[in-house]
Image (cartoon, rainbow, N blue to C red):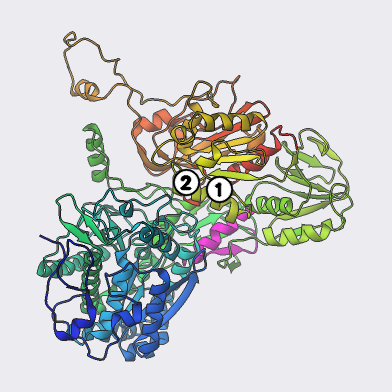
Amino acid sequence: MRLFYTSLLTASLAALTCVASAADISTAQPVPYFPQSDYRPDISPVPELLGHQFGERISEPAAISRFFEQLASRYPQKVKLVHYGKSWQGRPLFYAVIGSSSNISQLAKIEAGMRKLAAPASLSEPEAKQLIASLPASVWIAGSLHGNEISPADAAMALAYHLLADQSALTQQILSNTLVYIDPLQNPDGHHRFVSRYYATVGLEHSPDRLSAEHNEPWPNGRTNHYLFDMNRDWISLTQPETASRVKALQQMYPLLFVDSHEMGGDMGYYFSPEAEPYNPHIQTSQRQVLSKVGQNNAKWFDELGYHYFTREIFDAFYPGYGASWPLYYGSVSMTYEMASARGHHYRMQDGQILTFADGIQRNFVAFKATLETASQQASTLLQNFYQYRKTAAAQGEKDGLRSFIFAAERDLAGHQKLMGVLTQHGIKVEQAQQAFRACGKDYQAGSYLIRTNQPSYHLMRTLLDDTVPMDKAFLEKQEQRRANNLPDQIYDVTAWSLPLMYNLEMQRCNQAPRVNTTVVGPDTLIAGSVSNPDARYGFVVPWGDMAAARFLSAALQQGLMLRSSDLPFTHQNGQRYPAGTLVLSRADNPADLTTKVQQLAQQSGARVQGLDNSWVTEGPNFGSFNVPAVPKINVAMLWDEPTNPLSAGSARFVLERGIGYPVTAIRPAQLRSADLSRYQVLILPATGAGSYQQALGSVGSENLRQFVQRGGVLITLGNATSYLLEGDKPLLSSKREYQVSEQDKPASEARVPGRVLAEYREFEQMLKPYQADPDWVPGFIANAVVDQNHWLTAGIAEQVRSLYVGNHIYQPLRINDGRNVVNFAAPKDLLAGGFVWEENRQQIAHKPLVMVQSHGRGQVIAFTQEPNFRAYVDGMHLLYINAVFRGAAHAGALR
């Protein structure tokens, strides 16, 4: 039985007929189809708008843009097109709003009404009731966040066309009281990458064989955006312009239902809400009830059309960084839809049936239409729930006994500014004190940040700011049982994401709402720079310790300025103490227009620059000391392509290029094996995905890397790439990976062994465990780590940092004669900063190295055992990574 449908339509549907080209399909299929549709005879045919029928070709981003532009141009009374941003590569991000002519003509008024409803403190109850009675429902359909998940984007176009063409009573009812927001292509750069590469592999006909090149994308595949980010994890950190722009757009309307449409493995059918356990505890009962109603109505139509589906088994609603999660925390109801992917035109499933691209469009379209029906039927309930959510959230802080979050902001001013800007972009009100104040037994200086909990965004702020969002105990007990039976756990993503912890900033929780004069913080994430004493006779210093100083360093090097950086803290004659890492720019070493350049750089970077009239230091090294080495302008290379993990490579490059503006050269393994690396001072090996560097580089490539280090290069490994340094006869890192701690003895070689009495069930469980097994996989928790502040690598770093820990790689410390363990995980009782970790892992990870340094010849290797750039949102680790790049090169002995 084929998975395509064979429903016959009236003659008015002839314009929608799509004829597939594969030999497996012998009949014409209409796309889209919904029972009792009645299409207008004067509607523009699809090929005229799109260039092909739905399902006939995977649409390029440019074709999708043209399609919606045509709709908005031809049917302006029912369609409004809104451009809300651009991708990294400059492609437009847009959504179309479709509704009745009456609602579209009043769109600005309706959206303003929703913003009023979102601010219940400014509304009286009669005003709120009037808005709830008069406003339409709203649904946001978001397609193809992952660029290689192809059917949602085309299904979004099919839905838009259907809503304009269909005259049936159901569609007219939907349009009368529901605004439909269609964001068809959330990741145009990744989608373009997939489509162009897919059609480059197609031959005489499309192959359904899963072994074919069509179904096996080359690295890095189309899932990610330009910087290789999985944007379905970016909604809490807002690092990518696509995500940040979308969050801003959503806050113009606060859609009541949000559908994030994805694809999954081609053998898996169709998935819709309700989601799997565990649920984030900040999701309210009323929201879960609506999720169930949406799912039931979807199921009704899937049953009628004979489509299979499933719910609740995977795709949980715990992590807030999904597109299908974030809107829940402003009071919407959001959900994931997942369609089995043909990843091309045809795909042969395990049971022999052929899944088509057109099938994906059709099933998504039906799910979208069914969801719109639910929204229309539940319009008043959805509006009332939204208002009640926002209203009760504002009072929840007092009920919970938590009245405010306070950031003293005594260090890392750039990090504080960025975090407060991000929180503001999330819709959380942040204030900055204009005077000193006292709260909860502690004194705070002017400039401290204050977040009061009596806000409609209460649940979002708790989700983003709490150290740990607790998982359901029954769910965790079930996971322990699964582990005992050697079954994988069902934790879908990381268990911790606290922004203050990941920024490595100190935050206090207070049961008071301080009375202090404040100003409201805006969405800007860059701090204002400054230069004091610009006419200083000697030169300038830039205190090290935040990303603003790192941006200054990056730009200064690229402008050809000469800088030194102190390995040790020092006290100047002016009485001020400066931290290790502080940059020194003397007039003697730099051009005559140094002041002008420094002022420009401070303004651009946000750095706080201070002029010095002399170089006299009363404590610590003088500026001419060997402890104040020059920081050279360097060339940075990064291994790129298979077997590199695209997410690791993308975030590592992003932090350097977009975090501080320093360029990186990507080199593929085939070229790296025998390349002349003498032009580079730093080489970064991101974590690996499938495969290994040993296999990709071979003995020739490994020797080339060894020689690179010996000559004075800095080799930096991230995450599991550290294992590569342990391989071969002459490993570059004198550490070892550890097996799981086990009571098991080495298995006997004989067929029979002496008998043993098992007095307790625990002894039986121990015998089930394998000998020399890897530690259990850790889904992701935030770990405390202790910093050796006497090493040049940790200049400007706080005594304690927090790292996200994911995976099961645990390394032995370096012996003192081999190298230094400059950052180590904390003791067992202090290790867990946020989230959840298996008890055995907590014990074994404690005190093990997070960052190791080992010298070879004139160069060195710097190994991060966990990703310092994980999703680019562990901001508190970024300066340590930048130290490895720039201070590592300053401390290498390459001849320049």
Residue most extreme to the top: 754
Question: Which quadrant would residue 479 be assigned to in this image?
Answer: top left
Assign the N terminus to one quadrant of the image: bottom left
Above or below, comparing residue 47 to residue 545 in the picture: below
Which percent across, then down, holds residue 517? 61, 67
Identify the mark nearer the N-term, 2 or 1.
2
Picture layout, residue 896 above or below residue 363: above
Is residue 487 one of those drawn in magenta?
no
**Mark 1, residue position:** 666
Instruction: Label 2, secondary structure: give it.
Output: loop
On the image, the x and y values in percent for residue 531 come to 77, 58
Q: x, y (%) of residue 52?
A: 31, 75
Could you tell me which residue is drawn at 28 percent across and 48 percent down? 211
Q: Residues within 10 Å of mark 2 (few under 14, many from 20)?
A: some
Tell me the residue at 24%/22% (across/down): 766
Residue 606 in the image, given as x and y percentages of width and height? 68, 58
Label ID, residue 675 = none
At a point 61% along the width and 52% down the height, the residue shown is 443
Callout count: 2
- Residue that badge 2 annotates: 641
Q: Amino acid at mark 1?
A: Ala
Range shown magenta? 413-436
